[in-house]
C-alpha cells in the first residue's frame, strides 16, 4: 500500500496530539484514507442549486407558483453547457455526474408539478 506523508500546520499538529493515547491515534490512522476519500467527493451540483430548490419548496406555494417554477438563468446556462458538451461527447466523469443530478432534479420537479409527490 502506498504511503503518503502529510505536512500539517502547527495548530493542526497540536490538535492531533491532543487526540490522546495510541489506540485513538491508531483509529485515526486507520480512518485517514476513508476521510481523505470523503473529502474528495463533491456534490454533483453546487449547494446553491439545492438551496434554491429547498427555499422554493418550503415557501407557501400556490398551484400557479408551482407550475411556473423554473431554474435560475445561471442553472439554465450551466445545463445548456453540459448538454452541448454531452452531445459533442466531451463530458468529464464529474460533468456527467452533474448532468445526471440535474436530470434527477428535473424529474423531481416534474413529479411535484404533476402532483405525484
Image (cartoon, rainbow, N blue to C red):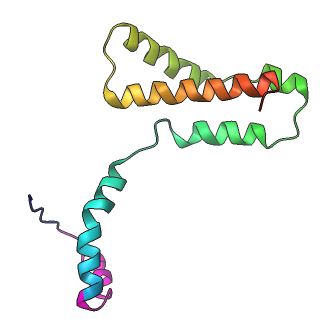
Q: Is residue 54 left or right of residue 16?
A: right
Q: Is residue 45 left or right of residue 89?
A: right
The residue most toward the left is 2
- Residue 75, given in percent of the width and then of the height, sits at 57, 25
Any part of residue 13 in sight: no
Q: Where the C terminus falls, by quadrant? A: top right
- Residue 82, given in percent of the width and then of the height, sits at 44, 18
Residue 9 belongs to the span the image colors magenta: yes
Residue 14 belongs to the span the image colors magenta: yes
Query: Looking at this view, is 84 or 38 the one in front?
Result: 38
Position of 75 relative to 80 (above/below) = below
- Residue 116, given in percent of the width and then of the height, sits at 78, 27
Q: Name the residue located 23 percent from the left edge and 89 percent from the top edge.
A: 22
Corner quadrant of residue 7:
bottom left
Any part of residue 90 in sight: yes
- Residue 33, given in percent of the width and then of the height, sits at 25, 61
Q: Is residue 54 left or right of residue 64?
A: left
Query: Looking at this view, is 104 or 36 the one in front?
Result: 104
Q: Which residues are magenta?
A: 7-22
Position of 77 relative to 17 (above/below) = above
The residue most toward the bottom is 21
Amino acid at each position: 500500500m502506498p504511503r503518503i506523508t502529510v505536512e500539517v500546520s502547527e495548530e493542526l499538529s497540536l490538535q492531533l496530539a491532543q487526540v490522546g493515547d495510541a489506540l485513538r491515534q491508531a483509529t485515526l490512522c486507520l480512518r485517514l484514507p476513508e476521510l481523505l476519500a470523503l473529502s474528495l467527493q463533491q456534490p454533483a451540483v453546487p449547494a446553491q442549486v439545492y438551496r434554491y430548490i429547498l427555499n422554493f419548496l418550503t415557501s407557501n406555494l400556490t398551484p400557479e407558483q408551482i407550475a411556473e417554477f423554473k431554474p435560475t438563468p445561471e442553472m439554465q446556462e450551466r445545463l445548456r453547457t453540459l448538454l452541448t458538451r454531452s452531445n459533442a461527447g466531451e463530458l468529464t466523469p464529474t460533468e456527467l455526474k452533474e448532468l445526471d443530478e440535474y436530470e434527477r432534479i428535473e424529474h423531481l420537479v416534474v413529479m411535484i408539478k404533476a402532483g405525484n409527490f
